[in-house]
Amino acid sequence: MNSEFEKSLGELLLPVDDDTDYIPLLSEEEEDDLSKMNVPDVLPLLPLRNTVLFPGVVIPITVGRNRSLKLVQDVYKKNKILGAISQLDATVEDPQIDDLYKVGTVAQILKILEMPDGSTSVIIQGRKRFQLEDILTDKPYHVAKIKTLEDKKEDPKEEAKAVAAALKDLAIKIIKLSSNIPTEATFAVRNIESPSFLINFLASNSELKLIEKQKLLEMDSVSERGLYLLEHLSKEVQMLELKNDIQSKVKTDLDQQQREFLLHQQMKTIQDELGGNPLDQEISEYRKKSKTKLWSKEIKEGFLKELDKLQRLNPATGEYSVQVNYIQTMLELPWNEYTKDNFNLKRASKILEKDHFGLDKVKERILEHLAVLKLKGDMKSPILCLVGPPGVGKTSLGKSIGEALGRKYVRMSLGGLHDEAEIRGHRKTYIGAMPGRIIQNLKKAKSSNPVFVLDEIDKVGKDAQGDPSSALLEVLDPEQNGTFHDNFLEFDYDLSKVMFIATANTTSGIHPALIDRMEIIYVSGYLVEEKVEIGRKHLIPKQLFNHGIKKELIFFPKKVLERMVENYTRESGVRQLDKVISKILRVVAKQLAFDETVEKKLTLERIHEILGPPRFLKDKFLDNNFAGVVTGLAWTATGGEILFVETSLSKGEGKLTLTGNLGEVMKESAIIALEFLKSHSATLDMESKIFSNWNVHIHVPEGAIPKDGPSAGVTMITSIASAFTQQKVKKYMAMTGEITLRGKVLPVGGIKEKILAAKRAGIKNLIISKENQKDVEEIKDIYREGLSFQYVEDITEVLKYALTDEKVRNPLNIT
């Protein structure tokens, strides 16, 4: 039974107020009096929402509609008689004849109550059933022509009494089973003498739906009405008995887990009785969603098979949660769902130029791809790898590319990744299994053609769990990634429309097979002038916004920015410059917060005051008068730098000493250089015996910094030759290149970075391998301005261009 019925049974115990003109319990004589009352053929109609009034039953109703309020007030002043009839649809505000049931109850208003919240409640009592024949008027409220209905005379009356007795027993049983109804209510139910009133009372307060209550009201036979209600109350008794049976099984104090289990059991029992199950509803939702997915026939059949498996599983098992996770992942993935590319090339070019300074090759490659897409309509996305020092904008470029193409953007950091399952996913048989991060990111992007940045691909690890680099081979192969296999999904996923952009600081840490699959684009560092422009156009506006400072309050002159770049940063990119600008603006923000005066134009003195003494001194060419000192060019992860190779000689037996924290490759270059000079001493006009009479010590300054690589070969051989011949090296000369025992000069990498380092140091002449000439020609003129290049093929050419005929003032007596 519902709480309404329980409350009504409880109210039977309340004493009757002396002022009331009604009693809740009717005897058979009183019921006869009600049925014999004269009812006019025309009655005002009061539409009822969500309830049905039965003869003899007293119910309170809340009157909300103005029309109904007017009706109640008018009737209460006259004979207090009206017709109460239920609406078919409770949401209809102004019901017409077609919106009402055809059978209602003649009612008498017993009392009107004004409630504290301002609403009006009316207590009415049902008198007699009637049939609605016609609506005569609807202003100011409905007035209808009715016909009263009489209950079917049944002979003998024993059947109705038997049904009433059975109902009374069931009601008493419900009172005993329910803990919410006081046991005293039993006496009240027993004292109801009239069978028809008992049936009407129990029907009015039962859990039956409105349509079923209306069906009861329309029944002419009291015994039929009783039998219908008896069936319903029997189910209620069974439900209460079932509930009490479950509760009786657990009589000890319940902890939280036991309590939850009991509640689930009760819920399951109730759901089974009512015929509804949330699990079935959930599976129905999955099935409904699957119809909207753009799956192939194979995937659709596989999904439905897995869904059927889920339906058979017990929710208490661990496998159930794994299966639910799998189903949800399949539904959330954007299978064959793509965003539309924006083919406005001018707009794309403008976005790329606005967000990044330089990086011309990358921008050109993106625009080429867009152009082909625009012409052809469909094309496999390129797989690019941006290689360059930190802080030059490789990662942030991916976001700009996504905006330019009109695609979603996702980023996945590969730094420190060492488990192959991070790429391919785990098999779904394990509890806690997940798809790989490629699939997870596509699920977040909600698109199968995003711009996908694979950050720090050169820092992928490898251990006993597998080699993620090998798993990336399938992802980054245009011929294979159309059928990428994730272990969790167990179906092939098409990655061919995804634009993968990998980033790396160097290619040395990347798997060779991966390099073969990607289009490598080298992103070099910036000139001082470029850094100043980047700072002025991008970094300063960004940091002004981040610090809440208006641009009118502070101004960075060009000279100040140049000083910040040269003396407070040493990098190829602009990450440190961004931090320096942020430091200055924090000081300005503090001054503004304290209402102090702020100088609008920054000066060099103010920069020194805020940032302190210069952290870095500009690399400069050392103009010295010593033989054996040569300027070389080196590439580091932060860009190009100049280095000095110093050679000194001492009396001895030809021993070679190397210092300066040199790596194995660099040591080998020194050995090759010395051996070449020994074997070609005659060609170079040097006495062969001097090599056995003098010890050679080669040192590369800044010994705390590890150094390695073959590009210092030409620098070392020039340094040794200068020391033995005591010939000075030409002024403002630097060089880079690998050497062989045959005397060949081989090409090296990082040419642009090395050229930038040479410009910063004031170098004017560069000696590099002939094979590097193509690399120099690819560099913009602005980077080469003020530099002259000597392209060499062998060591003799290097010594010819590098050494002067001038010897030092106090030459050693080398014999």
Image (tube, grey):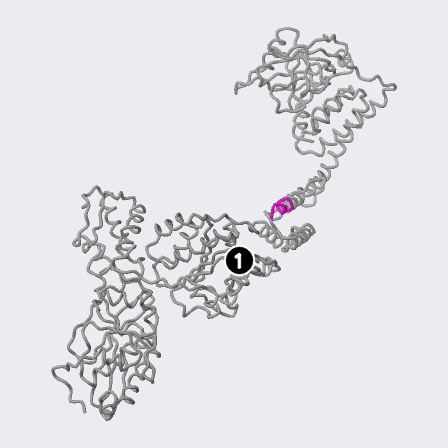
Residue at which label 1 appears: 496
Task: Name the residue at the right extreme.
Answer: 156
Question: Which corner quadrant holds the N terminus?
Answer: top right
When asked about the image quadrant of residue 727, the answer is bottom left
Relative side of 806 to 121, left or right = left
Q: Tell me the magenta residue range.
A: 286-293
118 or 464: which is nearer to us? 464
255 or 613: which is nearer to us? 613
Residue 241 in the image: state x and y as whole percent. 73, 38
Residue 587 to residue 575: above or below: above
Residue 448 to residue 102: above or below: below
Residue at 23 percent across and 78 percent down: it is 801
- The majority secondary structure of the magenta stretch comes to helix
68 or 354: which is nearer to us? 354
The amino acid marked with disc number 1 is Ser
Relative side of 85 to 745, left or right = right
